Structure formats: structure tokens, C-alpha cells
Amino acid sequence: MKTFDLVIIGGGPAGIAAAATAANHGLEVALIDERPTLGGQIYKRVGPGFKVKKASEVGKDYYLGEKLIAELDNSKVNIYFETLVATIENSEVVVIQNGKSAERLSFRKLLISPGAYDRPVVFPGWTLPGVITAGAAQSLVKTQRVAPGSRIFFAGSGPLALAFPAQLSGYGANIVGIIEAAPRPGILKSIRIALSVLGNFDLLRDAAKYQFHLISNRIPMNYRRIIVSANGKNRVESVTHARVDKNWRVIPGTEKTVDVDALCIGYGFFPSVELFRLLGCELGYEESRGGTVVKLDEWGATTVANVFGAGDGTGISGSYVAIARGRLAALKIAVELGKISESSLSKLAAGFRKTLNRRVRFQGAINNAYEIKSGIYGLANEKTIICRCESVTLESILPVLESTIDPSVVKAYTRCGMGMCQGRNCQRQISALIAEKAKISISQITQATPRFPTKPISLGQIADSTVSSEKYFIDAE
Amino acid sequence: MLNSDFLPGYLSQSENIEELPKQSDVVIIGGGLLGTALSYYLAKAGVEVTLLERNDLNREASGTNAGSFHFQIALHQLTENMTEADDKRLVDETKLMLDAAKLWDDIEKELNADLGVHFTGGFMVAETQEELQVLRDKQRIEEAAGLETHVMTGNEMREFAPYMAPDLSGIAFCPREGHANPLLVGPAYAYRAHELGTKIRTNCEVSRIEQITGNPGYRFKVHTNRGTILCNRVVNASGAWTAELSSQLGLNLPMGLSGLHVNVTEPREFFLSSMIQHIGRRLTLKQTANNTFIIGGGWPSREEKFPLRYSNIWESAAGNAAVAVRVLPMLKDVQLVRVWSGVWAYTNDFKPILGESEKIPGYHIAMVPTGFTLGPMVSRMLAEYMTQPGTQNLLPKEFHVDR
Ligand SMILES: Cc1cc2nc3c(=O)[nH]c(=O)nc-3n(C[C@H](O)[C@H](O)[C@H](O)COP(=O)(O)OP(=O)(O)OC[C@H]3O[C@@H](n4cnc5c(N)ncnc54)[C@H](O)[C@@H]3O)c2cc1C
Ligand SMILES: Cc1cc2nc3c(=O)[nH]c(=O)nc-3n(C[C@H](O)[C@H](O)[C@H](O)COP(=O)(O)OP(=O)(O)OC[C@H]3O[C@@H](n4cnc5c(N)ncnc54)[C@H](O)[C@@H]3O)c2cc1C
């Protein structure tokens, strides 16, 4: 089995930056990503063959990603592509490389930077073909250069609610409307927000550009409105949206319906905390950073020895923070492994620390402007599917909520969360339903027990016939 | 018939937070299958019962097991050199299983509920010639006990079960085996017990059982996180925690604990109506009504301190998957979705601990290793004993609490 000074899970901005920094200081590093290329979500590599109307709207991320990835060019980082980390135990990661059997890599230090995924939002029709998350639409465009439809509607909230459709429109896609649940920001607020958007300063300029793009392309943009339903027989044919109050509760009688063939949903992200949970790292809850977040010290150390975290997988903070966090963690790890001296640490870290602190200053602005409001959990009706893997509707969940506040009990009775996605889509909604019924805060609800594998893997790849069952006989004496 | 969809709603939040009753004839500790089944049979006989569960009902072994009825003689019942005494023991154990089978025949009618009970048979497979010999030896014992099994090899085997690895040395098939939905059986018993007047309190953890005097009619004061309750009789049905609570009273139970690993896969088109076990390696395997495969068989999981749940070990998944794929090759491409683990409590002789302590009159224990298969039946046996005091001989001697 190979042993590395540092194993990094996730080749997005956080993981790449950490790998490059650590390798620079002489650490032997393994960088693992389940995708065939580096870059993570924001720096996802573009495939050939799609016509770009205005390259500048997508070019910047692509360029920045190229620069960051190039840092690895002459380093000795061992990159494992198409390799899934299935679990972690005893200072070893269990990895499954595309098509192959499970293997183990042993580490002295571990950095987990698995990024985030789109927040699922449950409303009537959300499982209809043609309804996709904004991130998925973005990935389609970035990697396949395919638009999700010919009449695309955007519903969302948050800093990226504008960016997504503008980007997509830049590729030539036909956007027929955009709704944002939050109120239109005042001028001062919008400057502050733009400054703080995912720690990304040029987004002030970008935001203006996006806004300009939307206006000049006459794409209708409405604030204080939320998605109410996606309608259609076998796929989405129209969407209904309505005005909301300040808690994002729908105001009856304000509904409007638009004909569309694709609906993109972008209400922010959830951190991928599965691996942190498996290891027993202490977690917290911050709705504005995606809900469940990982407790980190100033260097990114978790509460579990030798395990660090960075990037959106520890709480949504954007790519600039991800990079800074990745580098800070790498420096600290280099010190702990005796590769650089304690005394030089603060000097080496100063620049990255500054980026990080700036982010903290703007946290407040984001917090109140883009906090997801409770109305987002109240869009389903009794017939709406809550767990899409197992087709469980709200009406079959409600009776269970009479007698428990434990999502695992709801799961046992209804199969909610037992399917392929293992609750990534429905568990927050279940927690919200329980919280409302029991009149407690969603952060107080315990989540289902974390278990491997992080994603489904074939039994053939897991099977190891060298493990003897004799060793495991229960000794009755 | 009770539609299982409505099972969960009957215990209201308010009932859960209501005060404990001041006293009760019987207090049952533990809301697993044994505790809930016992409360039903006692309540049906008119006994006043209070059931205390520290968590929600049915969340430990009874809600984490694989739901199989194991009637065939299995690996863990065999010893290296089988003697005549061993044969006799196995005949008795198999007869007990057959009694349990009869109860399962009628349980859906008894509780008027759909519990996913199916008798679709079970396989026991052999890979080597020695293992095949074991299949033949065990068949002889099973026949003596009245359990029908068929041993098949070669083309007969391949025709009967074409999906199995063609190079197995042989298979035994037992038409009487089957399964039920473990997530519903305990709750259904609790539901019916509740209808019959049993008071159920969840989130109620027993910390101490105090023997008291000078309070006519009450021999125990049970201490919980929600106050105390007086009772005349206690039944400890706390599964893996039975020994812990009993040791407070000076009883040393001959039992041990083991974390067990279970795998569940993605769904595939249904084809496997019978479960599969292995006579020489750790494997139980079945396709569920949801078309997923549940694979287990006794691979270990890692102990954790309560309230954490036992954690899983990759090696167990890897070893278990290897045996499963060896026996049922099509599983190779089927995806594992999740693993879990449960705490399994066993006795050193694999026999139930069932009955009233002679050392501490009024203190009862209900504990059994193959508790899903046998749980309802041993609970009914104990209820009979408790409603006809003095009839010690209702319970087999080898189940004795003070043994
Ligand atoms: C859908 C989506 C769209 C976004 N769009 C924008 C945008 O337009 N503009 C913007 O400024 N920001 C955007 N963001 C935010 C931005 O992408 C993130 O801030 C940034 O990518 C965070 O970097 P990261 O390194 O933490 O994670 P990521 O970039 O997400 O990288 C994590 C990597 O880890 C890998 N990984 C995860 N789990 C495992 C595992 N178990 N085994 C192996 N590999 C694993 C993943 O394959 C991924 O490549 C978006 C985020 C998402 C989720
Ligand atoms: C993974 C696994 C697979 C299995 N597969 C099978 C199978 O296929 N077939 C089969 O026949 N058997 C199987 N078994 C065994 C079977 O599940 C158990 O024997 C049976 O469920 C035991 O039931 P019980 O009611 O005694 O225990 P449990 O279901 O564990 O119930 C005990 C209850 O007591 C509660 N409790 C504990 N302490 C306290 C306290 N201090 N105060 C209040 N409440 C307390 C617990 O919370 C729990 O709910 C399996 C077991 C496991 C773990």
C-alpha cells in the first residue's frame, strides 16, 4: 500500500491549491478526484463543439482555472483521476478507480475538499423531466455545450441567480424569464453584496455585466417571486410562480404561468459533508453557508486528528476562500510534518489569511441578503413527491411526524432517503417538516447515521476474496 | 386489514411526553420485537402493561436485522465433531423453529396487518465436497425434526436455480423458510397492544431497577429519565443491553454482543424469491419486495459507545461482497448503495434466556439470539407463563434465567 504525506480528496480550487502548495514545500501528495479532469465545479473544463455567443462571459473562470491547474504541472503531485473515495478508516482512504477493484492509500495527513451540490427544492412537478438544477445546466453547458431547452426559465436566489442565466444566455441559450425570491437589492446593498459574492471581487464588475447582459437581451427579471409548480404531462410544459412575503411564503392570488420547456432551479448549495460525517468531525449549522457546515480552526483542522477541510464542502464560501483555505491548510500540514518551520508559517500564510479575513468582513452582508427563508420548505402539497428515489409523497410522510422527531424513523417507515441518492435530495426537507411540526429549529434535528459508500459502487469492485470469513467467526466461549 | 401506512401515526407526540403512570402490574423495558410482542400477548390476556423504550420503538436489533426466518440448521449451530448429543440438541432446536413457523403462518391474521410475510423457501449452498457432506448430514437431522429440505447437485441444481454459480458443489432447499418486513412487525405488535390498553412511553430510558419492600403489591421501583414507576413484575427485554441492567441486580447473564454488518444494493428486476445462505461461509442474501438485494450473514462492525451506532468496516463489505458474488455471479455489476450495522446479542449456548429469576422473584428476562425468527414465539411463551403463575414447566429448563 502506498503511503503519502498528504492525501487530498477533491480536485477543485481548494484541493488544487492545497496540492500545489504542499508539493512546493516538499510533501508527497496524492490528489484524488472522481472526475476525469481537474477544476471542480467552477473551473470545470470545457469540451469542444458548442457555439459561444460571447466567450467573455465564461472565459474568466476558465482562464483562472487553467492558471491554477498549471501550478501542478511541474510538481510531483500524484493525481488520481476518475477515482472515488468510498470511505476512510484507520488513516487510509479506500478508493475505487474507474472500473477497477477497491484499493487503499495511506496518509499521514488528510485534506477533504469535496465541494458542494445544488440545493434540491421540493415543489409540485419538481421531478418532471425538463426540470434541472442550475448547476446541472451549467455543467451541461461547460462540458457538453448543450443547453437544457429552447425556452428556459430560471428560478432561484442568491449571488449566482443572475450569473447562471447570464452565462447560459452568453452561450446562446434562450432564457424566457428569471425570478429571484429575495427583494431587489438597494444600490448600497448591491455593492456590498457584489463585493462579497463568494469572495470574488471581480464579481462586482461581473454582476453589472450580467445585469447589463440580461437587460440588453430583454430577459425579464422579477424579484420577490418563487417557483410554485412545474406543469406538464410527461415533461415540463409551463411553470407557475408567485409573489412571496419576507419569509418566502407564497401570497395567494399572485400566481403567473409561463410556457417553457426547461426550468432551472438555483437556490444555492449544500456542502458535501458525507466524508466529514463518516469520520465523526464536529459539525455546525449555518443556513447562510448551506446548512450543515464543518467546524474548522484557523488553519482548517477539523476536530478529528490529522484531518483538515477546505472549500465549499466545509460550508459555502466560494472559490477564492476555497483557494485560500486550501493553501493555509497545506502550510500548516507542512509545519506539522516538519517540512517548514513554525516560525516561518505566519509570514508564508499572511497573504492567504488576508483574503480569508476580507471574506469574514462581508459575511454579514451575505447573511441577511441571501439567507434562505423557511417558505422554501413549504411549497409541496400532499401529492408531491418528497423522496424522488423511492417515490414517497408528502401525504405518506405526515402521519409519521405525529410520533417522532427522528428522520431515521421517518426513513424506516416510508423509505424516504433509502434510494440511490441516500437522502441528499430529501433529508433537509424531512428535517424541515419535522422541525415545523415539533416547533424546534432545523439545526436540532439529528441526521441519519452516516455510512459508506459515498456513492454507489458495484459489488464486483468492492469484493475481495482474500478476506477470510473464518477470522470473523463469533466465538461463543 | 391494517394498512401498514398508518402504523406510525398512533403514538402521538403528546402521549410520548405525558408523565409516566405511577404504577403498573408489569413494566417491560425495551421496545424491540420481544418487548412489543410480549406487551401484546400480555395485554390480550388482560394484564396491565407499561412499555418503556429509551429511543423510538424498533430502532435497534429488531429494526436493523434482515428479517429472515432461519429454520435450516446453520453454520453457527454446528460444532467440529458432532456427537449424538449434538444431533439431539439440533433436533430440539429445529422443532422450536417449526413451532415458530406456525406462529408466522398466522401472524398477519392475528394482528390483522400486512407485514410482508412470505414463505418462499430458502437455499443453503455448499462450495466444497466437505460442505456438501454437511448439507446431507444436516438434512438427516432436519428430517428427524420434521423439517423438509432437499439437497441437489449437478444439473438438477442448475435447473432448479439457474441464476446460481454453476460450479457450486450443491444446494439445499427448504420450502418452509421465508421472511417478513422487520420494520413493521414490532410496530404492529405495539399498535395492537396500545389498542388493548398498553401504555407506551418512548424516549424513556431505564437507569435503575430498585427492589422495594413495604409497598404491598409492588416489588420494584423502576427509575427512568422521566421519573419512577412502581410495578409488581419487570420484564427486561432490552436486547443487547439486557446484561447491563441485570448486573445491577447481581445477575450475570451468559451473553455477548457483536456488531453485524449489512449491505443493501440498488434495485434490479425481481427474480430471486428465496433467500440464500452458505453452509461454510458467512452469507445471507435475499431480494426484497423493493427489488433491492440485502446481503449480510454475520460480518462484523465496529463497536461504538452508545448513543453512537456501531460503525462499519470496509473489510466486512469486501468479504461479504466476495461471497455473495461467488454464489450469485450476476451481483457483480449490481451497485452497493449503503451499508448499516446493528448490535446482535447472543447467548453462549445460542439458547434463549427466558423466564423469571428464582433469585429475584418478579424479575423476568426475554432475550433470544435469533430473535426475529423466534421473538414472537418466545414472547408468547413468556406471556403464557406470566398469566398462569406457578406453571414453571411451561418454559424449557435450558432457557432458565439463573443458568
Ligand atoms: C453546481 C455549482 C455551480 C457553481 N457555479 C459557480 C459560478 O458560476 N460562479 C462562481 O463563482 N461559483 C460557482 N460555484 C461555486 C464554486 O464552484 C465553488 O465555490 C468552488 O468550486 C469551490 O471549490 P471546492 O474546491 O471547494 O469544490 P469543487 O470545485 O466542487 O471541487 C470538489 C471536487 O471534489 C470531487 N469529489 C467530491 N467528493 C469526492 C469523492 N468522494 N471522491 C473523489 N472526488 C470527490 C469532485 O469531483 C470535485 O471535482 C458553483 C458551485 C456549484 C456546486
Ligand atoms: C444485523 C442483524 C441481522 C439479524 N438478522 C436476523 C435474521 O435474519 N433473523 C433472525 O431471526 N434474527 C436476526 N437477527 C437477530 C434479531 O434481530 C434479534 O435477536 C432481535 O431483534 C432481538 O430483539 P429484542 O427485542 O430482544 O432486541 P432489540 O430490538 O434490540 O430491542 C431492545 C430495545 O431495548 C431498548 N433499551 C435498551 N436499554 C434500555 C433502557 N435502559 N431503557 C429503555 N429501553 C432500553 C433499546 O433501545 C431497544 O429498542 C439479526 C440481528 C442483527 C443485528
Image (cartoon, grey):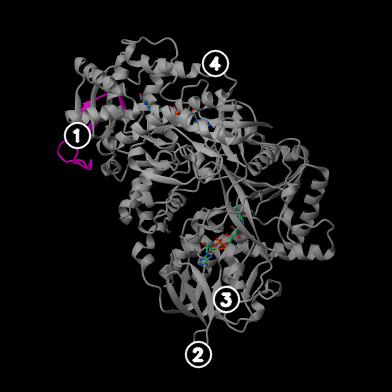
Furthest residue to the left?
A253
Cα–Cα gap, marks 4 and 3 = 77 Å
Q: Are marks 1 and 3 in contact (CB under 8 Å)?
A: no
- Give the residue type at disc 1: Pro
Q: Which residue is mark 3?
A: B384
Chain under numbered label 3: B
SS state under label 3? helix
Q: Name the residue located 58 percent from the left edge and 31 percent from the top edge.
A: A6
Q: Are marks 4 and 3 on the same chain?
A: no
- Give the residue type at disc 3: Glu
Q: Which residue is mark 4?
A: A73
Q: Are marks 1 and 2 on the same chain?
A: no
Between circles 1 and 2, the one closer to the viewer is: 1
Between circles 1 and 4, the one closer to the viewer is: 4
Cα–Cα gap, marks 3 and 2 = 28 Å
- First in sequence: mark 1 vs mark 4: 4
Q: Position of residue A314 (x, y in %)?
A: 44, 37
Q: Which residue is mark 1?
A: A183
Q: Which mark is residue B214?
A: 2
- Give the residue type at disc 2: Gly
Asked if the stretch drawn in magenta spans residue A261, the answer is: yes
Crowding near pointer 4: few (<14 within 10 Å), some, many (20+)?
A: few
